[in-house]
Amino acid sequence: MAPRRPKQPPISTEWAQSLIGLSMKVPENWWVGGIGFKLHDGKIDSFDISSQKWNLLLDARDEPFPFLMAYDAVYEYADEDSSTYPEYQLTYDPVLDGDDEIETEIATYTKTKSEEWNQVSTEDGNGNGNGRTIDPIECTVDEDFSVNITDEEVELLKDENGEIRYEKVFQWCLPRFGDDDETLFEFQAARMRNYMRKRVLEDKNNVIQRRRLME
């Protein structure tokens, strides 16, 4: 009698549901009896916990009901050209409940032990979290100087109590880009998205090629 394999933990429901909305391009030959490589557009509609598979809903097909799809097919047929593709965290293997290490197309993430976690208390007397306090640095300039700022911009630096917040002043001092006055954070995020998308596409193509060579 062959030894019984240890039961695999279920797929993380939170992670599985994060793939809902993922655009797909599925070839005709994925269906049983299907012939050819015609691509069918669709999206991940939901996650079926009982079968541990995702429901694929097609944009245009005679069948109005979804098709159950295992993760290896979700990973392979995800539409890389979709504008929302970088928003989804696709891993080499499905994320399971209790996973302490998750390997994605970008990097490997390891969950630290709970005893190493630190909680930053940021609540005020009313129980509201206002973020970490940033203490301003005292100005040591002897001579007077003026700041090129409008009254409207000054109002934007104040909190609900009418006090100017240092972190808002800091953000106001950062450079802006383009005709649409893009902030530094938005500019950096856009550059990072472009770079990460390039890495994802390159790494995924390499993984698909390796898998095909192993088949």
Image: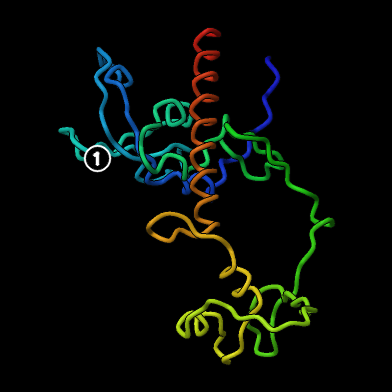
Tell me where residue 62 appears, x and y as whole percent. 15, 33
Outermost residue, bottom direction? 161
Q: Residue at x 50, y 52 (%)?
A: 187
Q: How many marks do you count on the picture?
A: 1
Q: Residue at x 65, y 38 (%)?
A: 102
Q: Residue at x 74, y 82 (%)?
A: 143
Outermost residue, right direction? 115
Tell me where residue 94 appears, x and y as whole percent. 56, 35
Q: Nearer the viewer, residue 21 or 70?
A: 21
Q: Is residue 47 left or right of residue 15?
A: left
Colouring scheme, one of rainbow, by chain, secondary structure, one colour: rainbow
Q: Secondary structure at mark 1?
A: loop
Q: Residue at x 29, y 39 (%)?
A: 57
The relative height of residue 93 versus residue 208 in the rendered view (above or below) is below
* Quarter residue 185 falls in: bottom right
The relative height of residue 40 versus residue 56 in the rendered view (above or below) is above
* Quarter residue 169 falls in: bottom right
Identify residue type, mark 1.
Answer: Phe
Q: Is residue 160 left or right of residue 67?
A: right
Q: Nearer the viewer, residue 96 or 170?
A: 170
Tell me where residue 198 appears, x and y as whole percent. 50, 31
Residue hosting label 1: 65
Residue count near mark 1 (Cα–Cα under 10 Å), binned few <14, some 14–19, many ≥20: few
Q: Can you say which quadrant of the picture contains the N terminus? A: top right
Outermost residue, front direction? 143
Tell me where residue 31 appears, x and y as whole percent. 30, 21
